[in-house]
Image (cartoon, rainbow, N blue to C red):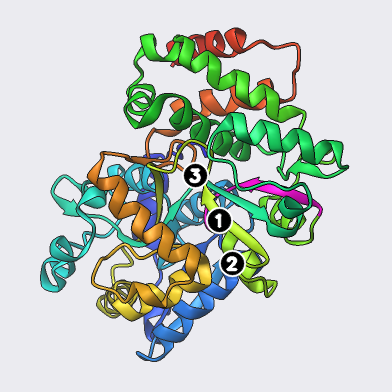
């Protein structure tokens, strides 16, 4: 999650030693962190589409849901002068590498293929640095989803909650029936997912924007205190084995009937699909409580490195063109659980949850309810994000810490940056 810096020596080594071996065999080596079962199916869709164009995808997968491990490997490879062709990144990491001059300028390709007309206007500004296109968006996720096990809700006679008050009431019923209400992995970014969903629910999209902007009045407000009050309630709804659990194992708890709910981005849907579960039958997908009019987005990007080889650039260009192909956009989204970053697609091919996400994005755009994710590196630089992650992680596991304590810790942490 943290910003990665390279010194001048490492950059120089990168420029001098970058190998053209990848170009010789018409391949692209992509470093990424799509390693869960469902994510791997998405990668397979990209590999197949690229192979049809005569380019081999060479996998450089690094496990770790937030990408922190992958970014560390990337840093080491760049410093050693052995870069991959490109890497999966979130927006803030893309900007960090671009500002160090390490990413290829994709502007000629963007102009030729009309990216400005094709890619969603709401995200385009994130891909241009100094007037140059520095990455290509691959797919869009929504973080504010609530996934539920249909049979468990039926067991307690409940409907999916539309507010946090409703969620708490249902969770109490589930707990009384011996059912774990909320599947959660005790990792900082998963606590962050909860936090950003509750911020939007309690304050709305405009309040969320104030938090992103660092508005101290908003951060110290009663609304923000109420956000942590709700997070405190969630402590009592998770199981004792939550700490350290990976997100996909938490998803498996809902799939297997071990927990009723999970708040997680729509990449979770790929795990349900891999398990053969059907939306609307085995499980359901609704916006996290209180956010049905809002869409918290994050985008996975591919950024490419300067390999100083024309053939290598052509292979990189082929991958960029492939991922923006309308059919590939849908093929990948179906496997990955995401939605396309372009609109000229056949959205009817998406499953029920995918179609809902696609329509919710359109509807949220009409009410200014589309906002970037804080905790998936779309809204804030890593330093600011880290303050929130540290505080919410400590808060969740420290019952003696009050909501006011948490808010004050955020103010203090931001003030020290």
Residue numbers of the magenta segment: 258-266
Whether residue 249 sits left or right of residue 298 in the image: it is right
Residue that carries the numbered disc 2 in the rendered image: 279
Q: CA–CA distance between discs 2 and 3?
A: 17 Å
Local crowd size for mark 1, using a 10 Å CA cut-off: few (<14), some (14–19), many (≥20): many
Is disc 2 in contact with disc 1, using a CB cutoff of under 8 Å? Answer: yes
Whether residue 108 sits left or right of residue 7 in the image: it is left
Q: Nearer the viewer, residue 159 or 7?
A: 159
Residue 105 location, x and y as percent? 21, 59
Question: Label 2's element?
Answer: loop
Which of the two marks, 2 or 3, is nearer to us in this view?
Answer: 2
Q: CA–CA distance between discs 2 and 1?
A: 7 Å
Numbered label attached to residue 394:
none
**Residue at (27% x, 65% y) in the render:** 342
Q: Earlier in the sequence, mark 1 or mark 3?
A: 3
Residue 240 visible within the image: no
Question: Label 3's element?
Answer: loop
**Residue at (58% x, 35% y) in the render:** 194
- Tell me the quarter of the picture where residue 354 sits: bottom left
Whether residue 161 sits left or right of residue 241 in the image: it is left
Which of the two marks, 1 or 3, is nearer to us in this view?
Answer: 1
Residue 51 against residue 270 in the figure, above or below: below
Question: Label 1's element?
Answer: strand
Residue that carries the numbered disc 1 in the rendered image: 285
Residue 153 visible within the image: yes
Numbered label attached to residue 144:
3
């Amino acid at each position: 999650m943290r910003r990665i810096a390279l010194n001048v020596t490492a950059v120089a080594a990168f420029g001098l030693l970058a190998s053209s071996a990848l170009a010789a065999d018409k391949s692209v080596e992509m470093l990424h962190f799509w390693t869960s079962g469902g994510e791997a199916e998405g990668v397979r869709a990209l590999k197949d589409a690229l192979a049809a164009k005569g380019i081999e995808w060479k996998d450089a997968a690094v496990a770790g849901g937030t990408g922190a491990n992958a970014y560390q490997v990337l840093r080491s490879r760049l410093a050693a002068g052995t870069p991959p062709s490109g890497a999966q990144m979130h927006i803030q990491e893309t900007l960090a590498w671009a500002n160090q001059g390490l990413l290829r300028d994709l502007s000629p390709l963007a102009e030729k293929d009309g990216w400005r007309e094709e890619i969603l206007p709401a995200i385009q500004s994130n891909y241009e640095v100094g007037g140059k296109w520095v990455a290509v968006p691959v797919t869009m996720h929504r973080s504010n989803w609530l996934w539920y096990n249909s049979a468990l809700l039926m067991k307690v006679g409940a409907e999916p909650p539309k507010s946090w008050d409703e969620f708490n009431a249902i969770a109490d019923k589930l707990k009384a029936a011996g059912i774990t209400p909320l599947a959660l992995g005790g990792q900082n970014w998963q606590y962050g997912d909860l936090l950003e969903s509750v911020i939007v629910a309690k304050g709305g999209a405009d309040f969320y924007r104030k938090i992103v902007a660092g508005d101290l009045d908003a951060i110290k407000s009663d609304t923000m205190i109420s956000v942590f009050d709700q997070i405190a309630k969630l402590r009592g709804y998770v199981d004792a084995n939550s700490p350290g659990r990976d997100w996909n194992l938490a998803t498996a708890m809902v799939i297997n009937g071990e927990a009723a709910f999970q708040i997680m981005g729509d990449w979770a849907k790929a795990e349900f699909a891999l398990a053969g579960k059907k939306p609307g039958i085995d499980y359901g997908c609704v916006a996290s409580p209180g956010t049905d009019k809002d869409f918290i987005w994050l985008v996975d990007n591919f950024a490419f490195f300067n390999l100083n080889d024309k053939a290598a650039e052509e292979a990189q260009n082929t991958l960029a063109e492939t991922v923006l192909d309308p059919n590939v956009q849908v093929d990948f989204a179906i496997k990955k659980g995401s939605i396309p970053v372009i609109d000229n697609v056949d959205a009817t091919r998406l499953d029920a949850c995918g179609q809902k996400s696609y329509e919710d994005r359109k509807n949220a755009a009409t009410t200014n309810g589309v906002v970037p994710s804080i905790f998936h590196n779309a809204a804030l630089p890593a330093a600011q994000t880290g303050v929130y992650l540290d505080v919410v992680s400590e808060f969740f596991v420290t019952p003696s810490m009050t909501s006011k304590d948490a808010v004050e810790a955020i103010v203090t942490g931001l003030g020290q940056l």
